[in-house]
Image (cartoon, grey):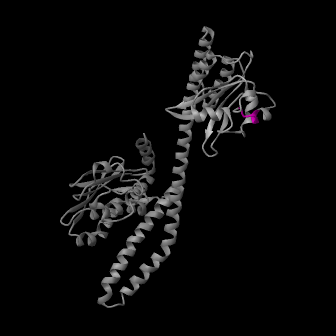
């Protein structure tokens, strides 16, 4: 190979390394194929699995618009033969070779006299074909031309592989987006359709409980208890739907966290007593007041306390603490229950995530409680996290900023 062509080849490699985009790189490559092999035209064809054919990915600018709609069959074309066999093909006179696909000549109004087609392969996977058309000196393509084209085909293989990866990433993103839309639709439909019948079941069961004899009270209590559990799931779904859609709003007012913590703890006394669990609140002496939405804070704390009781064995303890720290109120829910495996600790706040264990799965649920709690705290500009040791218990902590100004500062800190 002449020194001039070697220098030009090295220049091409440098140009491609600095190219700002994939399409530009492919266009540069095609133009350089023409110049380095003294050809009238060149092209890069890529494989389309949906039609089992090749299509023109890159060609000289004046030809590409005409060629975009052309599909080159794998049978009956030089490019198709090269793609199927994975071998270089040199045709010095297309009139004497039936493998030449004449549709392109008809479309462009030209005549292909000679061609070289090189397979573009990456990691053993055929991706396309690089072609040079019509040697300008009419002397026919030489071994040096083939060597240059094989070198450029290697460069093209990296470009096409990168393009394939980009397409796969885009498909994956689209699939994730579709799944998220389906999940959001499921949440919205489920919460809407179940809310009314559940309200009727709870209302009628509670009404009947006041009038039936003691012989049926246990059955009605079971109906009310399970319907209430379903209502909690529906409320969780509805909360997540509102947060996803961005329709969740805070009704800001002064909230006494001491009073809120005490109310939540008292609401679980009966449940804790039934499980023989000691449940208590420990409140600091300083004012525990934040500016926020009491109902949403209560939802978050309610989920944390319910989880603690659910995963604590009889004879265990659950403690809810609240105290003031500079700029925040800190609330902790601590238990000496079964704990959380270390591998699951970073994912427990994800929607629908459930710790897979025979100790946890028996309690059921949809894996929404902690994600709802996290969303409610973060709506206030706060932060929530968990610490746990399997077999020894867990501690969930959240920080609530005392006012919107502090919340703004907190968001900057927590997001950094």
Label count reads: 0
- Which residue occupies the extreme front position in the image? 96
Q: Main secondary structure of the magenta part?
A: loop
Please tell me in which quadrant of the rendered image residue 210 appears. Answer: bottom left
Report x, y in % for residue 122.
Answer: 52, 31
Report x, y in % for residue 198.
Answer: 45, 75
Q: Inspect the magenta stretch and tell me whether residue 123 lies in it.
A: no
Quadrant (top left/top right/bottom left/bottom right) for the C terminus: top left
Q: Residue at x 75, y 27 (%)?
A: 95
* Vertical relation: 90 (above or below) 171: above
Q: Residue at x 76, y 29 (%)?
A: 62
Name the side, left or right, on which 244 lies relative to 75. Answer: left
Name the side, left or right, on which 172 lies relative to 41. Answer: left
* Vertical relation: 124 (above or below) 326: above
User: Can see residue 212?
Assistant: yes
- Which residue occupies the extreme top position in the image? 3
Report x, y in % for residue 30.
Answer: 66, 25
- Which residue occupies the extreme left position in the image? 315
User: Can see residue 248?
Assistant: no
Pick the front one: 192 or 103? 103
* Vertical relation: 98 (above or below) 413: above
The residue segment tinted magenta is 100-104
Please tell me in which quadrant of the rendered image residue 55 appears. Answer: top right
- Which residue occupies the extreme right position in the image? 109
Quadrant (top left/top right/bottom left/bottom right) for the N terminus: top right
Q: Residue at x 33, y 79 (%)?
A: 222
Report x, y in % for residue 269.
Answer: 27, 70
Please tell me in which quadrant of the rendered image residue 254 appears. Answer: bottom left
């Amino acid at each position: 190979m002449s020194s001039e062509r070697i220098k030009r080849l090295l220049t091409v490699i440098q140009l491609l390394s600095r190219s700002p985009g994939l399409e530009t790189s492919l266009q540069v490559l095609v133009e350089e194929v023409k110049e380095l092999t003294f050809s009238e035209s060149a092209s890069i064809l890529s494989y389309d699995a949906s039609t089992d054919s090749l299509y023109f990915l890159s060609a000289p600018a004046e030809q590409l618009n005409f060629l975009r709609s052309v599909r080159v069959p794998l049978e009956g074309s030089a490019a198709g033969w090269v793609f199927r066999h994975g071998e270089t093909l040199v045709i010095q006179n297309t009139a004497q070779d039936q493998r030449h696909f004449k549709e392109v000549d008809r479309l462009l109004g030209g005549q292909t006299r000679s061609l070289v087609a090189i397979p573009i392969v990456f990691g053993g996977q055929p991706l396309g074909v690089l072609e040079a058309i019509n040697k300008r000196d009419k002397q026919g393509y030489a071994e040096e031309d083939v060597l240059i084209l094989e070198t450029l085909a290697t460069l093209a293989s990296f470009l096409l592989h990168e393009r394939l990866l980009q397409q796969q990433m885009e498909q994956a993103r689209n699939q994730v987006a579709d799944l998220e839309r389906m999940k959001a639709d499921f949440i919205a439909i489920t919460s809407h359709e179940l809310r009314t019948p559940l309200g009727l079941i709870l209302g009628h069961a509670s009404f009947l409980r006041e009038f039936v004899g003691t012989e049926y009270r246990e059955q009605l209590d079971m109906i009310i208890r399970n319907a209430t559990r379903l209502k909690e799931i529906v409320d969780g779904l509805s909360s997540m739907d509102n947060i996803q859609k961005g329709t969740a709003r805070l009704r800001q007012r002064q909230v006494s966290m001491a009073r809120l913590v005490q109310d939540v703890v008292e609401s679980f006394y009966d449940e804790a007593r039934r499980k023989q669990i000691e449940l208590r609140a420990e409140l600091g002496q300083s004012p525990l007041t934040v500016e926020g939405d009491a109902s949403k804070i209560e939802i978050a704390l309610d989920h944390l306390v319910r989880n603690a009781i659910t995963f604590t064995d009889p004879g265990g303890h659950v403690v809810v603490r609240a105290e003031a720290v500079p700029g925040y109120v800190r609330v902790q829910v601590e238990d000496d229950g079964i704990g959380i495996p270390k591998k699951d600790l970073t994912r427990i706040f994800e929607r629908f995530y459930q710790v897979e264990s025979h100790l946890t799965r028996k309690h059921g649920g949809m894996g929404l409680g902690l994600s709802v709690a996290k969303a409610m705290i973060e709506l206030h500009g706060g932060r929530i996290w968990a610490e746990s040791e399997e077999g020894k218990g867990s501690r969930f902590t959240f920080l609530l900023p005392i006012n919107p100004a502090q919340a703004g500062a907190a968001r900057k800190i927590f997001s950094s």
